Image (cartoon, rainbow, N blue to C red):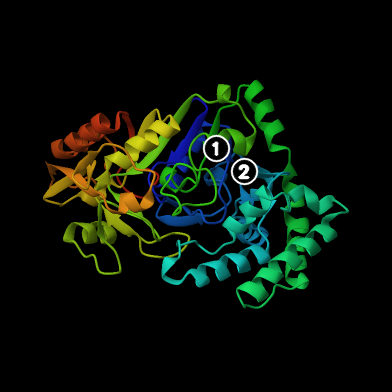
């Protein structure tokens, strides 16, 4: 296996954790390059479920170095809790994990501001996870963020005083909520000092040295391409760039280190939170199409980070083709094919219609996308069971026809097929 970027190319929750875990034995290094604890990568090995939010999904494997790059925002309490869970399961996380000295920290005042803003929006809320990711990235851009390396600097206390004064002014005067105390912040800083500073490293230097030594590397993204702050359904997006190009800035590497980009995508579409979703069939607010309900229930579509039920709908090839284009995707890993087992027919969105005009690409305006209706092709479903299949010969002809049509419309080959949650439920093509 070459150096690979693995990214989701819908609205997140595509099954990235399983795919990264599956590929990890073929590499020497797994590096996370963006996002924060709003990610939720679920691994199921031997029937046992592990959910990771910040620790890279390769952590369960021996002899694999796991890195968290500078493009990631780290909540000390969250990652320490994950580390303790892994340690209690016998995983020597302290020996396998390094965190970039340039990582920005999520502190209590970030979460307080995130929650206050979302509450103030009322029905117009974006659907943030409330974990402080957005405010942390804002502080980074405003050049007032606290990085892991700052915990060793004499100027830390003054920086915290300034940040807390500004945030508490906003909380108390604008949002009319309680302020965050310095004691709350100091408690988190102390956790970071004790548990994260020993893991601090120059991740960029490590990656370049490993590359020169001939090591194989896997770069792990979070969320999905349609949540990208530049290329997604803005403003209903996350606060970072989620496309494959973010791996370069988020780890400090060049394009010459990338050999392939694996786009991970469900055989249908899901979304959590607010925002346009042209092929939506089912949600917890009134849409209750039988096929969408089938996907939600059989696919157990609940967010691994938020616990919120996911909205479900048919495969949107317009979305995926857009993501393939902006991410330079060289191969598709299609997950949850088995969820479609038993449906009499399968629909594939190949274009949109908006005010009498056909659109073959995603409009930049989210309001315009809300007005789009899907143009569907209908394919026959299958009654055979694909769950747990490990050979392409076990896949029924109708399912193969669906995959072939996805390849044609999205202009990208399917290179991997997931037929269930476990690590062994996989087909390499």
Most foreground residue, 256 or 371 = 371
Image x and y of residue 30, in percent:
57, 38
What residue is shown with label 1? Answer: 246
Most foreground residue, 276 or 398 = 276
**Number of the label disc, if any, that sits on residue 8:** none
Q: Quadrant of residue 28?
A: top right
User: Tag 1, which secondary structure?
Assistant: helix
Say which label, 1 or 2, has the lower sequence index: 2
Image x and y of residue 19, in percent:
43, 41
Is 329 rendered above or below residue 386?
Answer: above
Image x and y of residue 83, in percent:
63, 56
Would residue 326 appear left or right of 353 to someone viewing this image? Answer: right
Residue at (44, 56) in percent of width and height: 48
Is 167 rendered above or below residue 17?
Answer: below
What residue is shown with label 2? Answer: 71
Q: Are marks 1 and 2 in contact (CB under 8 Å)?
A: yes
Image x and y of residue 214, in percent:
61, 21
Q: Quadrant of residue 248?
A: top right
Most foreground residue, 133 or 230 = 230
**Is residue 89 visible in the rendered structure shown here?**
no
């Amino acid at each position: 296996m070459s150096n690979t970027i693995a990214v989701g190319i819908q609205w997140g929750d595509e099954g990235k954790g399983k795919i990264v875990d599956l590929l990890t034995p073929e590499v020497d290094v797994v590096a996370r390059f963006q996002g924060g604890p709003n990610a939720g990568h679920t691994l199921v090995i031997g029937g046992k479920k592990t959910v990771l939010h910040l620790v890279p999904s390769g952590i369960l494997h021996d002899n694999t170095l796991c890195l968290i790059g500078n493009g990631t925002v780290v909540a000390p309490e969250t990652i320490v809790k994950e580390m303790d869970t892994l340690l209690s399961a016998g995983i020597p996380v302290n020996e396998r994990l390094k965190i970039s000295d340039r990582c920005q920290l999520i502190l209590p005042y970030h979460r307080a501001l995130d929650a206050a803003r979302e509450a103030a929006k009322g029905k117009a809320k974006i659907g943030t996870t409330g974990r402080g990711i957005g405010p942390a990235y804002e502080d980074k851009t405003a050049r007032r963020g606290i990085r892991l390396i700052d915990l060793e600097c004499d100027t830390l206390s003054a920086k915290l005083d300034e940040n807390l004064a500004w945030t508490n002014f906003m909380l108390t005067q604008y949002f009319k909520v309680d302020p965050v105390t310095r004691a709350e912040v100091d408690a988190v800083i102390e956790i970071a000092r004790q548990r994260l500073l020993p893991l601090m490293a120059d991740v960029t230097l490590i990656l370049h040295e490993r590359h020169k030594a001939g090591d194989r590397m896997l770069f792990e993204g979070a969320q999905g391409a349609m949540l990208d702050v530049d290329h997604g359904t803005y403003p209903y997006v996350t606060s970072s760039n989620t496309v494959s190009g973010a791996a370069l800035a988020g780890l400090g590497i060049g394009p010459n280190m990338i050999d392939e980009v694996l786009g991970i995508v469900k055989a249908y579409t899901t979304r959590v939170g607010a925002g346009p979703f042209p092929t939506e069939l089912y949600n917890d607010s009134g849409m209750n199409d039988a096929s969408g309900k089938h996907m939600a229930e059989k696919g157990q579509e609940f967010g691994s980070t938020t616990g919120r039920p996911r909205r479900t709908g048919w495969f949107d090839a317009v979305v995926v083709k857009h993501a393939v284009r902006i991410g330079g995707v060289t191969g598709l890993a299609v997950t949850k094919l088995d969820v479609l087992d038993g449906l009499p027919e399968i629909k594939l969105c190949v274009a949109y219609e908006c005010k009498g005009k056909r659109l073959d690409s995603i409009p930049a305006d989210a309001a315009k996308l809300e007005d789009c209706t899907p143009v569907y092709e209908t394919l026959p479903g299958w009654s055979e069971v694909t769950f747990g299949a490990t050979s392409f010969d076990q896949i029924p002809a109708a399912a193969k026809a669906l995959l072939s049509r996805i390849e044609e419309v999205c202009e990208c080959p399917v290179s991997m097929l997931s037929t269930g949650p476990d690590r062994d439920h996989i087909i390499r093509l």
